[in-house]
Image: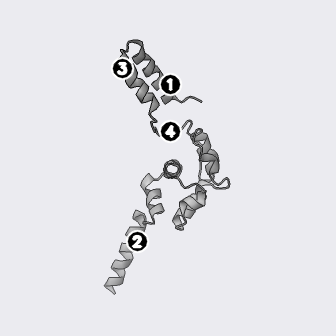
Amino acid sequence: MTSKVDLECYTKVQELLINADPATIKQIKKLLDTKIDVEDEPTQQDENLTPSSNVKDAYCNAYETDELGPEINPKLTFNDIHKALKAGKDFYDFIGVGDSLVRERIFDMMSDIFNKDYDYFYNLWLGEPDAKTKKLVKAVKKNLTKK
């Protein structure tokens, strides 16, 4: 399946080749021989995702060309991942894929589903408390020092 980005690139290359001199053609050939790593945009973002949606299905629908999507644990929901992050479980072991791009994409999906900032999930993954927990800890410490 050809992505929108691929089609735009092909069109641009065709435009350049129409009036290109030999030096330009040589440069284009060199560029075409160079692997360019472009982050995939979601093919289709499901607006109806919920915390109980299956992560593997949602990920594979959104990133059809990602070869790692099928390796995601097929039993997981976004709620399962949220609970695992809160419990301090290893994200990569939990989902069955050890790739940071997959993690970033899943966190991005979760930020939409749970209506929370991406950093909330990122900080959970790092083991850092969220703002509410920090406030609570600060208040408890304050009360303890008063006594």
Q: Residue furthest top?
A: 19
Q: Position of residue 2 (x, y in %)?
A: 56, 28
Q: Amino acid at mark 4?
A: Asp
Q: Position of residue 120 (x, y in %)?
A: 44, 57
Distance from disc 2 to disc 4, alpha carbons, whole Å, reads 39 Å
Of circles 1 and 3, the one toward us is 3
Q: Amino acid at mark 3?
A: Thr
Residue 40's tag is 4
Distance from disc 1 to disc 2, alpha carbons, whole Å, reads 52 Å
* 141 relative to 40 in the view: left or right: left
Residue 24's tag is 3
Query: Which residue is drawn at the image coordinates 42% and 16% (left, top)?
Result: 17
* 87 relative to 31 in the view: left or right: right
**Which residue is labeled 2 in the image?**
136
Rendered position, 47 above or below 144: above
**Which residue is labeled 1 in the image?**
7
The answer to which of 72 and 135 lies nearer the viewer is: 72
Which quadrant would residue 34 be assigned to in this image?
top left
Q: Is residue 54 visible?
A: no
Of circles 4 and 3, the one toward us is 3
Q: Amino acid at mark 1?
A: Leu
Residue 32's tag is none
Earlier-in-chain disc, 4 versus 3: 3
Earlier-in-chain disc, 2 versus 4: 4
Earlier-in-chain disc, 3 versus 2: 3
Q: Amino acid at mark 2?
A: Leu
